[in-house]
Image: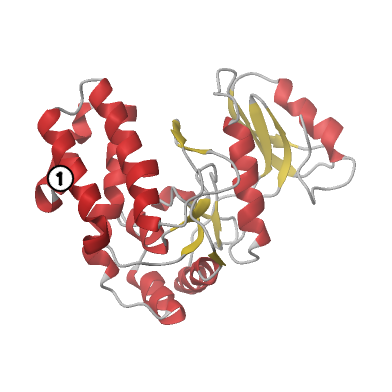
Amino acid sequence: MIRAAGARDNSDVNDAALLEGPEGLRHTHGQDGGAVVVKIRHGAPPGFFAAEARGLAALAASRTLRVPEMLAVGEHGIVLEDLGTGRPTDEDWQRAGAAIARMHAMRFDRFGFDAHGWCGDSPQDNTRDVDGHRFFAERRLQRQGARAAASGLLDGSDRRALDRVCDRLADLIPAAPAALVHGDLWTANLHACANGALALIDAGAVHHGWTEADLAMLTLFGEPPSMFFAVYEAESGIDASWRERAPLYNLYHLLNHLNLFGASYLGAVRAVLRRYG
């Protein structure tokens, strides 16, 4: 068990002791009396919580949107600052849109990350690549497609359609630089703190990737209010045409959900494959 860089002094021993508790998620207090969230999963894959800790550190270093302070992490759990739960105002959504635009403005020379991660319970290959289209095709779409085919969820026709989508990515998605992205940015991971301010949580999928992919996932399972996107677009200088490409980016997450939760997502996957493949 280790303490996060920048965590409060002398918290590593006592806060790490919280990871010896029963499996599950609980709200309690850390060694200094502050409210904490403890997530414990005894059967977690190796590196699962370490990936979340790395992602949180990368997001925190951007000094844009708030993230929970990481107090301790171990093989089977993590201790985080408890941000509370509140109701965001219009101004909170606007500030969040501007903050994520600033986060996305951070540029990197390669796609990927310094270690592999997790998108939900799926391993995420972050091997670095200078080519964003190749990275997304090989490290994201094809990895999920191969997994789904191996379990019988995709048939040969589906795989051929996925291959065609991957072959056409450079024509379908404009070239863009690698940026700091959350990687699993559905609406629940844009968390409203006790004071209503928005924060980023569940950071195991953080990497350097396409900013439009982050935006697209914010539309997959509900979406923030329009003012969030209006401020984001004004701050970043992009237009709303990213929405036309959202199904392509979200194909990765639909394939991931197909692998994690089964055939109920097959129709949505095939709809994207029919449209682009």
Q: Name the residue: 38% across, 74% down.
A: 227
Q: Quadrant of residue 174?
A: bottom left
Q: Position of residue 182 (x, y in %)?
A: 49, 53
Q: Is residue 6 left or right of residue 149?
A: right
Q: Is residue 207 visible?
A: yes
Residue ranking furthest to the right: 10
Q: Name the residue: 54% across, 54% down.
A: 200
Residue receiving disc 1: 273
Q: Is residue 212 above or below residue 123?
A: below
Secondary element at tag 1: helix
Q: Is residue 203 above or below residue 108?
A: above
Quadrant placement of the N terminus: top right
Q: Is residue 268 visible?
A: no
Q: Name the residue: 14% across, 35% down.
A: 158
Callout 1 amino acid = Leu
Q: Position of residue 62 (x, y in %)?
A: 63, 63
Q: Quadrant of residue 140?
A: top left
Q: Is residue 93 left or right of residue 7?
A: left
Q: Position of residue 246 (x, y in %)?
A: 27, 58
Specify the color scheme.
secondary structure
Callout 1 environment at 10 Å: few (<14), some (14 to 19), or many (20+)?
many
Residue nearest the observer in this picture, 158 or 8 = 158
Q: Is residue 91 above or below residue 117?
A: below
Q: Name the residue: 60% across, 46% down.
A: 114
Q: Is residue 80 above or below residue 63?
A: above
Q: Position of residue 249 (x, y in %)?
A: 30, 53
